[in-house]
Amino acid sequence: MPNFANPFNANVDRKINKRELIQAIRLDIAGELEAIYLYEAHVQATDDALARTVLQDIANEEKQHVGELMTLLRHLDPLEASLFLDGENEVKEMMEDLGIESDRNPESTIGSLKK
Ligand SMILES: [Fe+2]
């Protein structure tokens, strides 16, 4: 939820170091995820077609922001990036064990998606 009561809430009086920047980026990602949750909750809560369209469009833009920030985070913290990849690979192994095809398979074609 917005936290504007203190206009200096997010300000610091010095430049932040790299560890602090990484923490700030994580907080920014959390803010984007919260925004997505709120916009999509409001999409689900109304039948107004224009409101649904506008709010979903904004939610989708926030999802792009998550992608930008995650890319920045991976750049700033290569160890964390490798841990993200470890987690992704663990899920891919589980999917393989369950016979679930990866939806991000670059070899997917329209034909293979119809299966
Ligand atoms: Fe955003």
Image (cartoon, grey):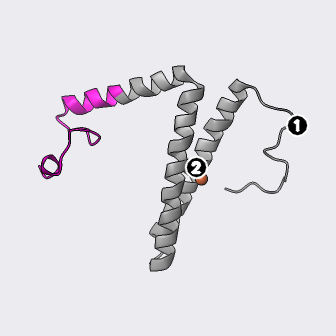
Beta carbon at label 2 within 8 Å of ligand 1: yes
Establish if 12 lies above or below 93: below
In the picture provided, is 90 more to the left or to the right than 54?
Answer: left
Quadrant occupied by the N terminus:
bottom right
Q: Residue 108 in the image: x percent, y percent?
A: 20, 43
Q: Is residue 45 visible?
A: no
In the picture provided, is 60 more to the left or to the right than 102?
Answer: right
Q: Residue at 19% across / 33% down in the picture?
A: 98
Say what amino acid the circle numbered 1 marks.
Asp
Say what amino acid the circle numbered 2 marks.
Glu
**96 falls in the magenta region:** yes
- How crowded pointer 1 is (Cα within 10 Å; few <14, some 14-19, many 20+) is rated as few
Q: Would you say the residues marked 1 and 2 are in contact, meaning their CB atoms lie under 8 Å apart?
A: no
Establish if 105 lies above or below 83: below
Could you say which is closer to the camera, residue 111 or residue 38?
111
- How crowded pointer 2 is (Cα within 10 Å; few <14, some 14-19, many 20+) is rated as many
Q: Residue 62 in the image: x percent, y percent?
A: 54, 54
Q: Is residue 104 visible?
A: yes
Q: Residue at 57% across / 40% down in the picture?
A: 69
Q: Which residue is mark 1?
A: 13
User: Most extreme residue toward the right, as rendered?
Assistant: 13
Q: Residue 92 in the image: x percent, y percent?
A: 29, 30
Secondary structure under the numbered disc 1 in the rendered image: loop
Q: Residue at 84% across / 52% down in the picture?
A: 6
Establish if 32 lies above or below 57: above
Distance between mark 1 and mark 2 Cα atoms: 24 Å
Secondary structure under the numbered disc 2 in the rendered image: helix
Beta carbon at label 1 within 8 Å of ligand 1: no
In the picture provided, is 100 more to the left or to the right than 12?
Answer: left
Q: Residue 35 in the image: x percent, y percent?
A: 58, 55
Q: Which residue is mark 2?
A: 32
Which portion, as a residue range, is magenta? 89-115
